[in-house]
Image: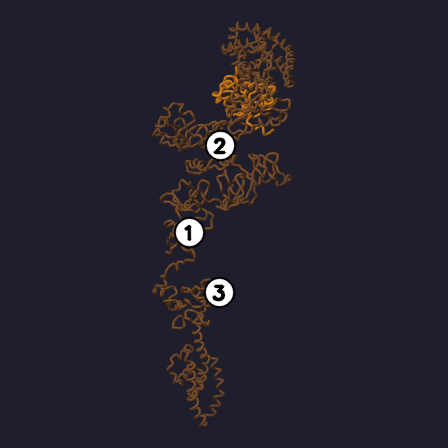
Amino acid sequence: MSENYVAPAQQRWLRACMVCSIVMTYARFRDEGCPNCEEFLHLQGSPDQIDSCTSQVFEGLITLADPANSWVAKWQRLDKYVRGVYATKVSGQLPDDVRTTLEEEYRITYIPRDGSATEAD
Amino acid sequence: MASAPFQFAGDSESEDDNFNPAPADLSDEEDGADHDDSPAHKKDRRGSSPAADNDHDEDEDEGDGDEPVRTSKKRAREDDDEEENAADEEEEDVEADGDGDEEELEEDDEEEEDEDDEDVQHRHRRKRRKDHRAAFFDIEAEVEDEDEAEDEERDGEEIEDFIENAHPDDIAEPLHDDTRHRELDRRREIEASMDAEKQAEILKERYGKRAHARGYNDMAVVPKRLLLPSVDDPGIWAVRCKEGKERDVIFSIMRRVEERAGTKDELAITAAFERGGPNSVMKGYIYVEARRQNDILIALDGVLDVYPRTKMILVEIKDMPDLLRVTKTPTLEPGAWVRLKRPAKHAGDLAQVLDVTENGLEARVRFIPRLDYGDKSDSFSMAAPPQRRRPGMPGPRPPQRLFSEIEARKRNPRYLSGNPQTNTWTYMGEEFENGFQVKDIKIQHLEVKDVNPTLEEVTKFASGAEDGTENLDLKALAASLKDSNSSVTYVRGDVIEVYEGEQRGVVGRAVNVQGDIVTLKVTEGELAGQTIEVPNKGLRKRFRTGDHVKVIGGSRFRDEVGMVVKIVEDRVTLLTDQTNTEITVFSKDLREASDIGGQGSLGQYSLLDLVQLDPTTVGCIVKVDRESMVVLDQNGDTKQVMPSQIANKLPKRKIAVAADRNGSEIRIDDVVREYGGQQRQGKIIHIHRSFVFLHSNATTENAGVFVTRAGNVTTIAAKGGRTTANSGPDLSTMNPALKRMGPNGPTGPMQPPKSFGRDRALGQTVSIRKGGYKGLMGIVKDTTDTHARVELHGKNKIVTVPKADLVFKDKITGKTIDIYSRGGRGGFGGGGYPGGGDRMGSRTPMGAGSGERTPAWGAKSVARTPAWGRAEGSGSRTPAWGDGSRTVNPYDGSRTAYGDGNRTAYGGATSYGGSRTPAWSSSAKTPAHDGFGHGSKTPAWGLGVHAWPERLFVFARTV
């Protein structure tokens, strides 16, 4: 059983979550939501939300087999997330309201994954 | 009880989040929170598979078996009501809140401390927590049995401690279904009646705490430098793979990882990633993270398109972060230029961004449609099997043309709708505005970098404006051009400044360029003299004001040459040689120039050429750009044209001739001036029919070129000294009527008679009296009316000298001769030389004038006799004087000129002598003698002698 595998034909439907950068098909986002961020992104069953919070523009796929022990995961700040396929770069910006909600209600510092954050480091 | 508010809130707003456990750290809390979770929860858990709970998930799988999972799945298939039902049940426990809160806070604290704790610690904590729960269960058990049962079941699922409890209840649960259905309805009512504010409050309470619990904050705060890899981290190997298949390989590995997870040959790799992409330097490799190289060999064995058996490169620890470096793609701005990739029909076409969606993933662009309107090809495409069109071969695509409503209406009126007012149309499902097709396109289907729009393409967009205004946004164009880094090239000798990175501010001269690395010899600052290597990314060329530079590549000002006048950061303003205008370009597009003036030509057309624009219009090229030129047409209008718009080039016709305002002929290169108007003066560069194109250095407008009618100019100077008078026989001098009536004819001094025939001066030896050749001798070779061309003896040279400055010499003796005096060339006296004779002649009468006294003298003495008698009365009177002299000169009657006095000069001396003799002898002597002789008159003589001077004085005073 391999749920994170996506056949090449299906890869055109792939999207990446702008918060955790996990890469899944649109259908999975719709059916299951984001496994890491569902709590505040509420993607499941909500095409609008999926459109605005996930991006079809991403690059640099990562297979994360063992998030807890991988340096790659740590560097990408994925070590607390589930196993799966992630992207190193996700283009696009989280809508402002979602971002505000994240930061004010969940007190989560949102780190954009489009490369704009790395320059600060 | 702790879970009660959560459940409620989750229920009211969105069921999902409640059931979604997330990263590992959350699981702890959920242990507490999820006691009385519904079966639906399990479904979710299964579905979204939070690997966060990795450790216990695995345990669960092994110890627990799949039974609870199956149960949950079965339940999930039951209606949603059940799910909510479960939630509602918990709502009853809202009152018991306080207890739960406390517990939660405690847990929060714990979590912050132990976030990164290892398993052992987790377990320990869980055990401790069990005590809390035990108490909690007791209370709840009194209230509701079902809940407790569920709690236990859930706990059992997640935490091994409760496994035993879970099972029996789980089996028993379906029996209670009816009750729960009924209860659900009740809860729904209550829920609906609750006011929003209260809901929000609960929501807030719940979320606030959760966020805290998650520890996201901690994660974000850890700076990257603390995450740098160490020796304890697994290594990363680069493994070759087939280019373009990187993603597939990654997914294949993912599949294998998941397939073998939990089995005895579980993969030992921890991660694998790719950084492929058509333009990436890291394509053709995937990177696998593992503890041992052998793990990778095992893991990748048999995976398609990846070749672990070839060479595998261990990535050094310090290089590891670079593998995952992410640079931000510049965001699209409205007005920027992009190229389309996706509608295959338009692949490669230029498009302009109108708008970008908030998340920056989609752009609304406009581009020139490729429509053929033809039902023939449309029907063809529709009839054609779809797979024929699929393989990316658009086939012959229609040319780019702006949308035409008329054509669309003619061909397919059914598919056309729109508003003629705003000129927006929908045709065949596509939108058109002002002739452009407008479409929302995802940014991955746009080529954003290296767009390099050509001016020709861009002008199509500009000229498309409805009112014909040119609305070229050069700023956006510049931005698009700036993005293209490909054109930045440095060559040896370029002076380069580092403006980014650690070496910022260093200035040096390029010594060597290899790929992206430029070797600089530093010329300024502390590092002077050292040689450093820098990537060309943070470099720019450096110029100084006054440098002579040439624009290369990139910019639309390509090939302009000019002088740097201003530098702001990397923008350099220069004054072009060709047009004397200021242009601003990026320093990367400049290079120091050795040539002057720049190109000035485009293909076969160059500056100042005369070209035919259409059968009735010609124009002179006044500016040449990279891809277009500016032409000044015969009507004085300038227009920008492409080389393709020019019919042909008109060769320069040297023999072209026109007549100016005065009827004089004008030819190319003559200098003429406009008559009237601005009186512009210029050199003729082209004559076309009745138009002359003039070039002047007095203005820079249109490169100094202006056009006027031939009949509207007057000649200032003809080429090579050709004058209008000289260009042929001078008719005015040949016409005797004109000569007489000429401006100077009647009033001025009489012209000397014109000589005809061969000029006598020809062949004469002359000496030059004046000017730079003064004193030189020569032979007259040719003459005009006023000038002579003299071949000098001393120098092999023929010079033109005014005739008046020549002295004619005898060929043999060298004496000065008058070539005109011989042979009776009367009237030549107009010239200065023969006039000498006149003057000499006039001197004689002057002498006579002074000699006037002599006749007067004589006259007086003569006059004395007749005057004697009346001397007292009229002695001083002038007429008497004249009378007297005339009377006493009876022999001089032949001389009419005598009365004219000094004018008739010649005979003066003779008459003098003549007048004197008779006057002397006849009048003075004879009678006087007689009178004296008679004695009576003798005293009169003496008196006369005495009185003479007196009278003479009187006379002088009267005169």
Marks 3/1: CA–CA distance: 40 Å
Labelled pair 1, 2 in contact (Cβ < 8 Å):
no
As drawn, B473 above or below B867: above
- For the N terminus of chain B, the quadrant is top right
In front here: B347 or B241?
B241
> Is disc 3 surrounded by few (<14), some (14 to 19) or many (20+) residues within 10 Å?
few
Residue B614 falls left or right of residue B266? left
Q: Quadrant of residue B760?
A: bottom left
Q: Could you tell me if residue B809 is visible in this image? A: yes
Q: Position of residue B566 (x, y in %)?
A: 55, 43
Q: Which mark is residue B794?
A: 3
Residue labelled with disc 1: B684
Residue B883 falls left or right of residue B491? left
As drawn, B955 above or below B42: below
* Chain letter matching colour brown: B
Q: Chain of mark 3?
A: B
Q: Secondary structure at mark 3?
A: loop
Residue labelled with disc 2: B334
Q: Position of residue A52 (x, y in %)?
A: 51, 23
Q: Which mark is residue B549?
A: none
**Mark 1 or 2, which is nearer the eye?**
1
Q: Secondary structure at mark 2?
A: loop
In front here: B537 or B312?
B312
* Chain letter matching colour orange: A
Q: Could you tell me if residue B9 is visible in this image? A: no
**Mark 3 or 1, which is nearer the eye?**
3
Q: Both on one chain, marks 3 and 2?
A: yes
